[in-house]
Image (cartoon, coloured by chain):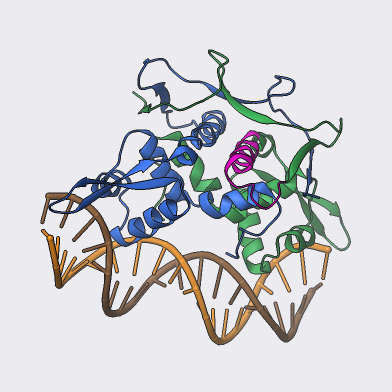
Chain colours: A blue, B green, C brown, D orange
Amino acid sequence: MQNLDDQPCLIARSLSLVGDAWSLLIMRDAHAGLTRFDEFRKSLGIAPTILTRRLAALTEDGLLEKRRYSERPPRDDYVLTRAGLDLLPVLFAIGAWGRKHRSTKGVTRFFDAEKGSEIDPVVIDSATGAPIGTRQIRIVPPG
Amino acid sequence: MQNLDDQPCLIARSLSLVGDAWSLLIMRDAHAGLTRFDEFRKSLGIAPTILTRRLAALTEDGLLEKRRYSERPPRDDYVLTRAGLDLLPVLFAIGAWGRKHRSTKGVTRFFDAEKGSEIDPVVIDSATGAPIGTRQIRIVPPG
DNA sequence: CCGGATCCGAAAAGATACTG
DNA sequence: CAGTATCTTTTCGGATCCGG
């Protein structure tokens, strides 16, 4: 895939980081509390080489941060940065779409881990408060 | 990538369709009104063989639908289905994330093509009306 | 045991030319 | 205009090995 970083569209630029299933699944697991290499590997069933690459890319791009949790032996784990935390609405929007259109085999549900309450995400237009529904959009480049 | 279709998590199942940059960019362009093979090809700068595969997959998965617009010669174009239309909030959530964390080089803006008003998407918890912020989540499988 | 690095075959992407 | 055929290059993903 070509370099999306230089495109004017924010969706395209964002996809250069996040337009990949593994990366988004890693971010999902990070939001669920996983931090270590082996936790991700076992949860995802991902080959270690791929996981190394994805974690490095996500770290480089500022969605995850390496944190040393042991000096001897040297051990790092991966924690969400601010930008990584802000990805949660994207994950929820994807989940909400799946609930509507991919729920033939039973559905997972999302809970606030602290409060215990279930989360039912919806994307709205903050200007009007109305849910984003069916409409044609116009994407306007900068300048 | 392994088969995500059979996983319990809705995010994973959705990503089997949409966890790919090309597919999401095609869907973005479809929401902007493009319908024809060559429109997508030129807009995205994508190789025709890749575009063919992606359009076939998106059609197979029910996000796009082939529609015959000419009988002689036979010509089809691609229009959004209900499930495809419902993907707009996901695209907006990605764009909103990019606006916050990837806007160093100027930002695109989203407008309602009909009403002309700008759209500023935000993901909220419909139960409380509160924006999805920073929190740890718990993902609960069915059953 | 944990967090990778190396190596290699398989798969997908990309460019280009061509066809009905 | 909407693809297919063919070729080359890049990336993926699994197995295995390594250093602490």
Task: Tell whether B90 sits left or right of A55.
Answer: right
Question: What x and y, as percent, mark residue B45?
Answer: 70, 65
Q: Report the residue at 16% width, 50% height from top.
A: A71
Task: Tell whether B106 sits left or right of A66.
Answer: right
Task: Tell whether A32 sits left or right of A60.
Answer: left
Q: Report the residue at 79% width, 56% height from top.
A: B36
The vertical placement of A10 against B87, above or below, is below
Splitting the image into 4 quarters, where does residue B7 fall? top left
Question: What x and y, as percent, mark residue A103?
Answer: 49, 30
The vertical placement of C4 against A29, above or below, is below
Question: What x and y, as percent, mark residue B91?
Answer: 64, 40
- Front-most of A75 and B138? A75
Magenta span of residues: B89-107
Residue reaching furthest front? A71
Question: What x and y, as percent, mark residue A42?
Answer: 26, 46
Determine if residue B65 is in view.
no
The quadrant the C terminus of chain B occupies is top left
Task: Tell whether A63 sits left or right of B33.
Answer: left
- Count up the numbered dots: 0
Q: Report the residue at 62% width, 59% height from top.
A: A4
The quadrant the N terminus of chain B occupies is bottom left
Query: What is the chief secondary structure element of the magenta stretch?
Result: helix
Is B125 a magenta residue? no
- Front-most of C17 and A63? A63
Splitting the image into 4 quarters, where does residue C5 fall? bottom left
Q: Report the residue at 85% width, 52% height from top.
A: B69
Residue reaching furthest top? B128
